[in-house]
Amino acid sequence: MQRKTVAVLGWLFCLGLFAPAGLAQSFDIVKVADGVYAAIGHAGVFSNGAFIVNQDDVLVVDAHLRPSWAKDLIAEIRKTTNKPVRYVVNTHWHNDHVQGNQAYVSVFGASVEYIAQHTAREDMVSKAVSAVKDQLNKDVPERIARTEKMLAEGKGPDGTPLADQARASLSERVASDKSFIEELKAIQITLPTITFERSLVLHKSERTIHVLFFGKGHTRGDAVVYLPKEKVVITGDLLTNGISFMRDAYPSQWIGTLDSVRNLDWETAVTGHGGVQKGKEQIDRLLAYMKEMVAAVKESIGKGMTLEEAKKAIDLSKHQAGFPAYAANPQGFVAASGSAVERTWAELTGKIRD
Ligand SMILES: [Zn+2]
């Protein structure tokens, strides 16, 4: 890829704007074991899901940002089976994993059970509901306005003229965001009907499905779905192809949680974002990054540095090449690492309130 193209893609990624949102298909469906499928979100959809076909029913993991995308996944499930979806597991409360919940009850009726760790349910009540209003009244209209301004001026945020590819992508984004506004007006967060503390096991005739909580990490209530027979783990955002969003994270505790996920006996990981992972290389890279990052923040606090001094001094750049998410977006690694250091600092200095 040419250098200039990389730069343009870089700021489109940064703005969350690299989104061929007009694609008819929202997911790549990847069979990872008999009856077990990953739904890898396309660039505009971004967050992944999974579905597990049992003898009498289907279990879905995560429900994306838009009910229309959840319906796209239902259409994909329909190509594989006409058994009903009876369970939806939300790996955590973030809106890009729960806002599509209502699609399942609308298609399959009130018998659908929604499963989450109990603090994830609390956070859906206290945070995800208000975040829908914020998206509707502020975030998405402001993004539309910013994008329309760029299109009107014919310039990207760094002042460079828009190439045809970028212009087309931005125009698609505006159209997609406008239809998202219409969806947001009708989104009511469908809450978990079954919650658990540490583990919940579904004993189906052909497999057991473990829904497990190992401690705080990406949020305070991350669940992983583990299939011991198939050696598959579905991780939500505890593991992605990059450094997951840190705003609600507990980075120092994430290490122990991630170690527990790693120590399960699995060969395939379906993660919250990015492609299917075979083997444990990526989780090992994330663990190595997190351990070094947290240790560096601890050391900086011990030396009496300020957060700003620590952010300047901590150099994590040797880890960048280990994250596929930043291959076309090197500045994304720098931004994610800055957030990681800030959030770790807040955690270790007792500034995070549950
Ligand atoms: Zn998340």
Image (spheres, rainbow, N blue to C red):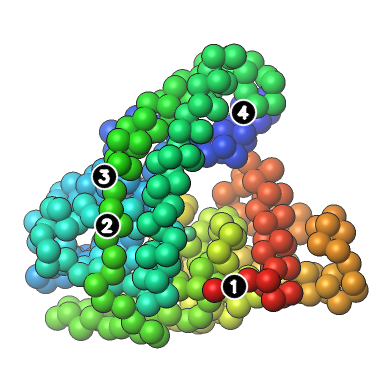
Q: Which label number is shown at residue 353? A: 1
Q: Which numbered mark, 2 or 4, is in the foreground of this view?
A: 2
Q: Residue at x 90, y 74 (%)?
A: 303
Residue type at numbered disc 4: Val
Label 3, label 2: how many angstroms apart (C-alpha)? 12 Å
Question: Residue 41, image x and y in percent?
Answer: 38, 47
Mark 1 and mark 3 in contact? Answer it, CB < 8 Å. Answer: no
The numbered mark, 3 or 2, whose residue comes first in the sequence reads 2
Residue 282: which quarter of the image? Answer: bottom right
Compared to residue 177, the image places residue 54 above or below, namely below
| Structural crowding at the residue carrying mark 2, measured as other residues with C-alpha within 10 Å and reported as few (<14), some (14–19) or many (≥20) | many
Label 3, label 4: how many angstroms apart (C-alpha)? 34 Å
| Secondary-structure class at tag 2 | helix
The numbered mark, 4 or 1, whose residue comes first in the sequence reads 4
The numbered mark, 2 or 4, whose residue comes first in the sequence reads 4
Residue type at numbered disc 3: Ala
Residue linked to disc 3: 186
Residue type at numbered disc 2: Asn
Q: Residue at x 69, y 76 (%)?
A: 350
Mark 1 Cβ inside 8 Å of ligand 1:
no
Q: Which numbered mark, 3 or 2, is in the foreground of this view?
A: 3
| Secondary-structure class at tag 1 | loop
Q: Residue at x 35, y 36 (%)?
A: 181
Residue linked to disc 4: 8
